[in-house]
Image (tube, coloured by chain):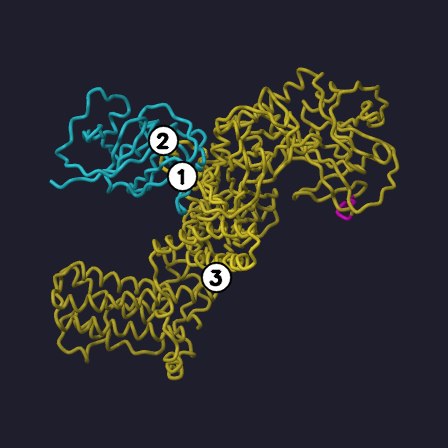
Chain colours: A yellow, B cyan
């Protein structure tokens, strides 16, 4: 089936258009059946206003949609019918036998046109003058319809081409009209006879689809949820039973349940185009009002999402799109100045990834400047300058998701009232999703929404605390860290608050047992292994300390009993594979209840403490540089990376590597320290230090250990070193970090405290 | 007036009754999932044929101290409009048929949280049965 106007709208693919026409047909057929009944009833009782209103609505809807889809004839005939109905509705005329005849004829013609459209997507060359003349005559009260004159009023539908220039006056149709040259008929439609034969053997659209009550779908979904649970129990039971017949049956049950679950979930799925269909209009209106030229590109509109989730992401998505047009893209003049095309591109992309749906909103605008973000965060009192300086670029960018943050220099009525990105984040986290952004200054920004496929069933991580099992949504778990006697991860205390140094960063910790009102215990100090689940809550990362990590499982979310809603740290309950009830933890509430904001302050306090008490020595990262051991204060290590050798490129006399969208200067410590490194390997281990949005990488030959800096320092011998110490009975040299950074990037703005801290510590 | 049937059970030595029409079922269950930080009268959660049911300790609800339970506890499951809630009781008694006219005023000596949950008192052959207001008993908010 081909649409009559293949080029209808730039953002619609042909398939999308087909879908819309199909929906229109199904809906119209249904409405027409009702309309027949209504008309017959009306003839008996012409005063039934609700019937009349219903008939009017039906005809009006068909008229509106056919106008939108550029079915000119359909629009013409329904328009005529509507004129008559309007008179009836307003009481200017009462429905008599003749009026009913005429209206029923209109319905017949509409039906015929719909059937024609269903066959080949075209309206065909049906004659409409007769029926329209009849309607006119009926309105005018003229006796003989057959000889009636041509319609006196302007036939609306023929004027598609005329509507286009008037687009601004009629914004509702504007996007259509602009993109759609009036092309109501094509030569193809001239051969209706064979098409009719084919149609006879084909089932009509109305017969191949069924409208189903959403409640019924919800119920099916619930039942499938139960089945999933039972399946989990069954599979677990047979695992230990050792009965082959049983295990085979359980295997089959497993497969069938998965397929059924998938099938039922599909019934609730709707393509994201349902959501996107409104965006071209939003973008058009907005770009006009803020003076932008925007080309909207939609990719993956057929990606499907559970309908309840679709509803939930509507507002966040609209907000991001508005934000991108208003703040992301520059004005045409600025774009030309920056060497870009005056027309900005806004790309919406939807696709599946790891059992989630990812929706990206990408613009090629000016990008988000981390410096600006950092400065605003300081100005708003969210963080101190030192804290911002210690963050890497990604973290700084993520500050926009904090409550009360808005970087818009000018508050407009579009966005930028300081509510926005944090609301987007909250909305997404409420449905178990997440939002993130990537941005390159001058190149553009990409917002990335990760949305679960369905709300009812979630991938969960089962953990144990105080001999009870709890469920964490997998979505919020970033990584798991095992804390055992000798591993580098260790729990420390900063003004009483537990923290963990993870890759050189302070991760605030929450002990699950304590968060749930249990007694404070430090099992790790008795040599017991514990685990830290690194979670993402409220835009911060924090670590949840649990006793054990058991398994991952698909769980069905059950609502909480009303008695427990006020407790606030549970998102729901579920039944695990062994039939026991387990509570699903509300990660956001845990973060809130633990006052994690305090942990940030604690981290700042830790930095302050290091300044006040220089004897509180830092921990040291011990690296190997050719055959020497070189130590770097852990506080000056933002990240450890391994770059492939070929990723290190030469620019002039320096080496650089592309890293997280930045160009990172690389300094080989062997060069700085005057050693010759003959190591040949595929990767280059490097210590990355970031501050104020800048980063440098110090390439070493190996990472050896992280140790406490306890031994006294020997004197400095210059040459890029600030002293030496004895670690593990081996002499280890201390790197003069300041010199190394400056050697890597002379423009690097070192924060004050970094150097002071270091000088005192050495 | 037609007679009303009551399912009776014992809590802390006192006999209580719930109208049979309000009781979904009675069963013994031994494994409850504790709910940390929940109000004290929440005895735990359990799985009733795929439903997560909250069990309320009627002892605590009536203002008595909670008792360490060993072995299976008896659940009287009450169905309300929104959800099923279980009441943990000490012992299940008979179903008795009573005339509403047999109800006596609630003794003045009854006070505390229990007073709000009782609708009537019925003298049986050997002891007094207090009729519980099912809805009030499963409503949690003011009891915490």
Percent of width and height locating residue A8 = 44, 65
| Badges 3 and 1, same chain | no
Percent of width and height locating residue A597 = 53, 27
Residue A546 sits above or below residue A117 on the image: above
Residue occupying the point 39% across, 67% down: A22
Q: Which residues are magenta?
A: A646-651
Residue B39 sits above or below residue A266 on the image: above
Using the image as rendered, state which of residue B31 and residue B136 is in the foreground: B31
**Left or right of residue A237, residue B16 in this image:** left
Percent of width and height locating residue A514 = 52, 27
Find residue A10 and name its label.
3
| Badges 1 and 2, same chain | yes
Using the image as rendered, state which of residue A678 and residue A292 is in the foreground: A678
**3 vs 1, front mark:** 1
Using the image as rendered, state which of residue B136 and residue A751 is in the foreground: B136
Q: Secondary structure at mark 3?
A: loop
Q: Which residue is mark 1?
A: B29
Q: Which residue is mark 2?
A: B57
């Amino acid at each position: 089936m081909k649409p009559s106007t293949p080029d209808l709208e730039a953002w619609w693919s042909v398939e999308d258009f087909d879908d819309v026409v199909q929906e229109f047909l199904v809906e119209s057929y249904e409405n027409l059946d009702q309309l027949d009944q209504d008309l017959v009833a009306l003839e008996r009782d012409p005063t039934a206003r609700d019937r009349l209103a219903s008939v009017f609505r039906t005809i009006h809807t068909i008229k509106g949609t056919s106008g939108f889809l550029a079915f000119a004839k359909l629009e013409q005939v329904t328009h005529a019918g509507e004129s008559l109905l309007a008179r009836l509705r307003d009481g200017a005329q009462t429905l008599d036998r003749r009026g009913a005849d005429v209206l029923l004829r209109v319905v017949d013609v509409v039906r015929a046109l719909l059937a024609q459209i269903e066959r080949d997507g075209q309206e065909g060359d049906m004659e409409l003058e007769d029926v329209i003349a009849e309607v006119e005559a009926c309105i005018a009260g003229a006796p003989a319809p057959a000889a009636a004159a041509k319609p006196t009023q302007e036939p609306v539908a023929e004027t598609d081409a005329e509507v286009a220039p008037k687009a601004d006056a009629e914004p509702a149709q504007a996007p259509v009209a602009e993109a759609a040259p009036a092309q109501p008929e094509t030569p193809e439609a001239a051969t209706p006879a064979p098409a009719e034969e084919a149609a006879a053997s084909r089932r009509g659209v109305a017969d191949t689809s069924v409208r189903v009550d959403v409640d019924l779908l919800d119920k099916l979904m619930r039942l499938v949820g139960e089945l999933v649970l039972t399946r989990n129990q069954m599979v677990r039971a047979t695992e230990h039973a050792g009965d082959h017949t049983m295990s085979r049956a359980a295997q089959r049950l497993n497969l069938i349940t998965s397929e059924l679950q998938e099938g039922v979930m599909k019934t609730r799925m709707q393509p994201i185009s349902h959501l996107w269909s409104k965006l071209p209009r939003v973008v058009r209106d907005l770009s006009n009002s803020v003076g932008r030229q925007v080309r909207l590109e939609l990719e993956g509109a057929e990606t499907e999402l559970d309908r309840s989730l679709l509803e939930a992401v509507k507002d966040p998505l609209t907000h991001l799109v508005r934000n991108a047009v208003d703040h992301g893209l520059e004005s045409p003049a600025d774009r030309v100045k920056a060497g870009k095309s005056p027309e900005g591109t806004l790309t919406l992309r939807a696709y599946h990834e790891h059992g989630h749906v990812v929706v990206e909103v990408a613009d090629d605008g000016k990008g988000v400047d981390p410096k600006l973000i950092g400065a605003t965060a300081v100005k708003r009192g969210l963080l101190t300058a030192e804290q911002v300086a210690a963050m890497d670029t990604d973290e700084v960018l993520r500050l926009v998701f904090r409550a009360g943050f808005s970087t818009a220099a000018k508050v407009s009525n579009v966005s930028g009232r300081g509510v926005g990105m944090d609301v987007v984040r909250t909305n997404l986290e409420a449905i178990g999703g997440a939002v993130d952004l990537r941005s390159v200054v001058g190149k553009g920004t990409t917002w990335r929404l990760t949305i679960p496929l369905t709300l009812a069933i979630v991938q969960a991580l089962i953990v144990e605390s105080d001999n009870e099992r709890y469920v964490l949504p997998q979505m919020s778990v970033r990584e798991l860290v095992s804390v055992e006697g000798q591993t580098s991860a260790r729990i420390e205390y900063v003004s009483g608050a537990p923290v963990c140094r993870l890759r050189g960063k302070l991760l605030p910790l929450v002990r699950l047992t304590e968060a749930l009102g249990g007694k404070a215990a430090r099992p790790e100090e008795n040599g017991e292994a514990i685990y830290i689940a690194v979670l993402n809550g409220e835009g911060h990362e924090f670590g949840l300390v649990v006793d054990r990590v058991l398994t991952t499982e698909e769980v069905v979310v059950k609502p909480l009993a009303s008695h427990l809603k006020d407790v606030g740290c549970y998102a729901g309950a579920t039944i695990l594979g062994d039939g026991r009830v387990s509570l699903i933890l509300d990660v956001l509430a845990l973060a809130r209840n633990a006052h994690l904001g305090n942990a940030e302050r604690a981290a700042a306090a830790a930095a302050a403490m290091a300044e006040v008490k220089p004897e509180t020595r830092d921990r040291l990262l011990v690296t190997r540089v050719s055959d020497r051991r070189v130590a770097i204060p852990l506080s000056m290590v933002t990240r450890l990376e391994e770059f492939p050798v070929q990723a290190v490129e030469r620019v002039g006399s320096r080496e650089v590597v592309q890293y997280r969208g930045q160009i990172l200067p690389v300094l080989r410590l062997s060069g700085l320290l005057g050693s010759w490194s003959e190591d040949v390997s595929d990767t280059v281990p490097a210590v990355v230090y970031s501050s104020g949005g800048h980063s440098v990488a110090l390439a070493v030959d190996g990472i050896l250990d992280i140790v406490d800096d306890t031994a006294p320092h020997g004197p400095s011998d210059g040459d890029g070193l600030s002293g030496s110490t004895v670690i593990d009975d081996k002499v280890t040299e201390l790197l003069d970090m300041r010199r190394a950074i400056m050697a890597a990037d002379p423009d690097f703005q070192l924060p004050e405290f970094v150097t002071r801290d270091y000088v005192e510590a050495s | 007036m037609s007679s009303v049937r009551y399912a009776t059970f014992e809590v802390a030595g006192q006999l209580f009754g719930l109208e049979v029409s309000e009781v979904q079922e009675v069963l013994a269950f031994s494994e409850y999932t504790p709910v940390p930080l929940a109000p004290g009268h929440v005895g735990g959660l359990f799985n009733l044929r795929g439903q997560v049911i909250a069990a309320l300790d009627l002892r605590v609800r009536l203002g008595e101290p909670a008792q360490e339970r060993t072995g299976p506890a008896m659940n009287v499951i009450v169905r309300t409009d929104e959800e099923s809630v279980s009441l943990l009781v000490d012992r299940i008694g008979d179903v008795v048929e009573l005339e509403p006219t047999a109800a006596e005023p609630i003794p003045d000596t009854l006070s505390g949280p229990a007073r709000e949950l009782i609708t009537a008192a019925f003298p049986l052959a050997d002891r007094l049965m207090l009729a519980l207001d099912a809805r009030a008993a499963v409503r949690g908010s003011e009891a915490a």
